[in-house]
């Protein structure tokens, strides 16, 4: 039986996720319906992607009995409300990152998943790329010895895009792209909570961070540092330094297609899209979709590769970094 998907939101990321799903066998993945806040948007999306049903509200999608799992591709201030709507309708949920605006919202979402006995995963697609799986394997086998330092950065000029800079749209470097750096560090250090976190940054007039730099100290004198910016283009790579060698992830570290291990480069290509994409390497979203399918087939309610605890730690670290930089959203007041 194919995993039956519903798509929530007809925006750019949902487009790319849908294109990525089409790179997987149709007997494994089917898109049943798409919902947008405007029916016309949903209908145009459905036509473009040959999706049988289009809804003009998320509530209609939640009521569709044929849908097994919903991909939530809204902007992140709406992640929590949309996910709660679907989970309370007993739908499994794959929700775009960041999972929510803060750790309080994440806790409420995890509680709702448990209460309704449904699967919930933050769509940290990077973790499921073949290159990322190889990093995990190399670290588990201590190919570079004990990791002592992780450095990564992610910066792209997004100042012209409202959702990147407007506070009410969930803008700011940390939440939009810093989450990729933070999740990478979490993956390398196996979900361990750091002993300390220090963040500094510069904010825009809109009250969100343009650029943030974060230093994390872990047990046994292990360190990590990352920088993220919506103002400038950065090298966008990552490096893991161990006592016996290094693993380098060349640009673009959030959608890796090659690794350089102790100077030796290996390619990990991803499939070509059948339609144009909005974002780089988006067909790589196929791997998180297949992860969801495999978890559902096994009856799991969370993914071992991106657990609820991983998502909560991410949110808590984002909260603390934002606090130190001075970024507060309306959701933090509740």
Image (cartoon, rainbow, N blue to C red):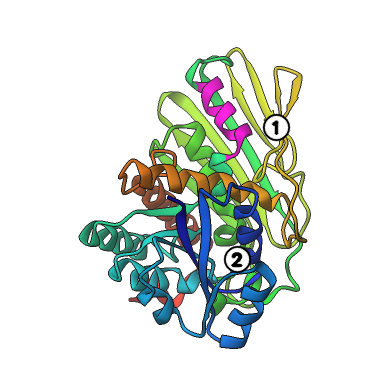
Examine the rendered structure and indicate whether residue 150 appears above or below residue 72.
above
- The residue drawn where x is 46% and y is 32% is 189
The local crowd at label 1, few if under 14, some if 14 to 19, many if 20 or more residues have their Cα within 10 Å, is some
- The residue drawn where x is 51% and y is 45% is 290
Q: Main secondary structure of the magenta part?
A: helix
Examine the rendered structure and indicate whether residue 39 appears above or below residue 95.
below
Q: Position of residue 291 (x, y in %)?
A: 47, 43
Residue in front for this viewpoint, 207 or 62: 62
The residue indicated by pointer 1 is 268
In the rendered image, which quarter is residue 176 located in?
bottom right
Q: Position of residue 194 (x, y in %)?
A: 41, 38
Q: How far, Cα to Cα, is label 1 from label 2?
A: 24 Å
Can residue 282 be seen?
Answer: yes
Residue in front for this viewpoint, 255 or 41: 41
- The residue drawn where x is 60% and y is 12% is 244
Q: Position of residue 228 (x, y in %)?
A: 65, 53
Can residue 214 be seen?
Answer: no
Q: Is 205 contained in the magenta span? A: no
The residue indicated by pointer 2 is 14
Examine the rendered structure and indicate whether residue 195 appears above or below residue 73.
above
Kindly state the secondary structure of the residue where label 2 is placed: helix
First in residue order: circle 1 vs circle 2: 2
Question: Is 309 left, or right, of 235 in this rendering?
Answer: left
In the rendered image, which quarter is residue 159 located in?
bottom right
- The residue drawn where x is 71% and y is 53% is 155
Q: Is 131 contained in the magenta span? A: yes
Magenta segment boundaries in residue numbering: 129-139
Q: Position of residue 325 (x, y in %)?
A: 53, 61
């Amino acid at each position: 039986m194919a995993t039956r998907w519903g798509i929530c939101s007809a925006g750019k990321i949902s487009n790319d996720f849908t294109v990525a799903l089409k790179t997987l066998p149709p007997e494994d993945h089917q898109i049943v319906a798409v919902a947008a806040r405007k029916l016309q948007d949903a209908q145009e999306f459905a036509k473009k992607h040959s999706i049988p049903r289009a809804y003009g509200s998320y509530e209609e999608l939640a009521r569709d009995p044929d849908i097994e799992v919903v991909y939530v591709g809204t902007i992140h201030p709406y992640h929590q409300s949309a996910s709660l709507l679907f989970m309370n309708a007993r739908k499994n949920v794959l929700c775009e990152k960041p999972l929510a605006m803060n750790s309080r919202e994440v806790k409420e979402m995890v509680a709702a998943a448990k209460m309704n006995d449904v699967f919930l995963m933050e769509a940290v697609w990077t973790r499921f790329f073949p290159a990322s799986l190889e990093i995990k394997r190399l670290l588990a086998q201590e190919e570079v010895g004990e990791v002592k330092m992780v450095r990564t950065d992610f910066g792209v000029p997004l100042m012209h895009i409202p959702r990147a800079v407007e506070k009410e749209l969930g803008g700011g470097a940390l939440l939009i792209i810093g989450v990729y750096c933070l999740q990478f560090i979490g993956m390398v250090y196996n979900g361990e909570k750091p002993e300390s976190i220090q963040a500094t940054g510069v904010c825009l007039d809109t009250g969100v961070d343009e650029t943030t730099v974060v230093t994390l100290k872990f047990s046994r004198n292990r360190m990590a540092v990352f920088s993220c910016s919506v103002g400038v283009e950065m090298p966008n790579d990552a490096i893991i330094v161990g006592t016996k060698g290094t693993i380098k992830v060349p640009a673009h570290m959030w959608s890796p297609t090659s690794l350089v291990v102790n100077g030796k480069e290996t390619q990990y290509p991803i499939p070509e899209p059948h339609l144009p994409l909005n974002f780089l390497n988006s067909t790589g979203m196929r791997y998180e979709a297949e992860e969801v399918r495999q978890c559902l087939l096994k009856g799991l309610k969370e993914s071992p590769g991106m657990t609820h605890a991983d998502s909560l730690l991410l949110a808590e670290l984002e909260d603390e970094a934002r606090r130190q930089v001075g970024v507060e959203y309306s959701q933090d007041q509740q």
